[in-house]
Image (tube, grey):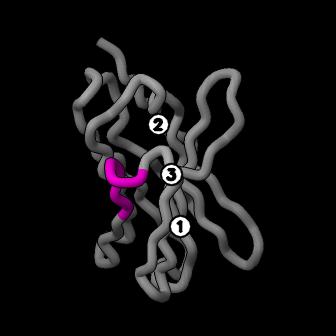
Amino acid sequence: QVHLVESGGGLVQPGGSLRLSCAASGFTFSTSIMRWFRQAPGKERELVATVFMTTGGTTYADSVKGRFTISTDNAKNTMYLQMNNLKPEDTAVYLCNVLRLAKNYWGQGTQVTVSS
């Protein structure tokens, strides 16, 4: 079955960088839509970035455009989110998501905290 495991979160100062990883298994990685979401306490879940695996196309939320980059390593069945110039408002639990056959699958999330 679809299984997603996030890693790479942590505490970073404003302006710093982190790279999140999502190790995936149990589905056809190359034909899926994979996304990063985030959710901060008291706020709605936000779609951060999407990669369309069939085309390689990507989309980003306006709030992260120019700072975050979504990518994949197909040989490793892993998706990444490179986060640069982090801001305190980026603090959230970041969740890996796979959209497959109109169903959403989720990892457990990894905490990113941006604070001085």
Residue 16 in the figure: left or right of residue 51: left
Residue under label 3: 62
Q: Secondary structure at mark 1?
A: strand
The structure residue drawn at horizontal position 67% and vertical position 74%, both measured from the top left corner, is 100
Q: Secondary structure at mark 2?
A: strand
Numbered tag placed on residue 93 in the rendering: none
The structure residue drawn at horizontal position 45% and vertical position 78%, both measured from the top left corner, is 57
Q: Residue furthest left?
A: 16
Residue 97 versus residue 2: which sits nearer the camera?
A: 97
Residue 4 versus residue 53: which sits nearer the camera?
A: 53
Which is in the foreground here, disc 3 or disc 1?
Answer: 3
Looking at the picture, how far across and down is residue 92, in whole percent?
Answer: 52, 30
Assess disc 3: are there few (<14), some (14-19) or many (≥20) residues with their C-alpha within 10 Å of its C-alpha.
few
Rendering quarter of residue 85: top left
Residue under label 2: 110
For the residues bearing labels 3 and 2, Cβ distance under 8 angstroms? no
Q: Which amino acid does the dot numbered 2 rest on?
A: Thr
Rendering quarter of residue 42: top right
The structure residue drawn at horizontal position 73% and vertical position 79%, both measured from the top left corner, is 101
Q: CA distance from mark 3 to mark 2?
A: 21 Å
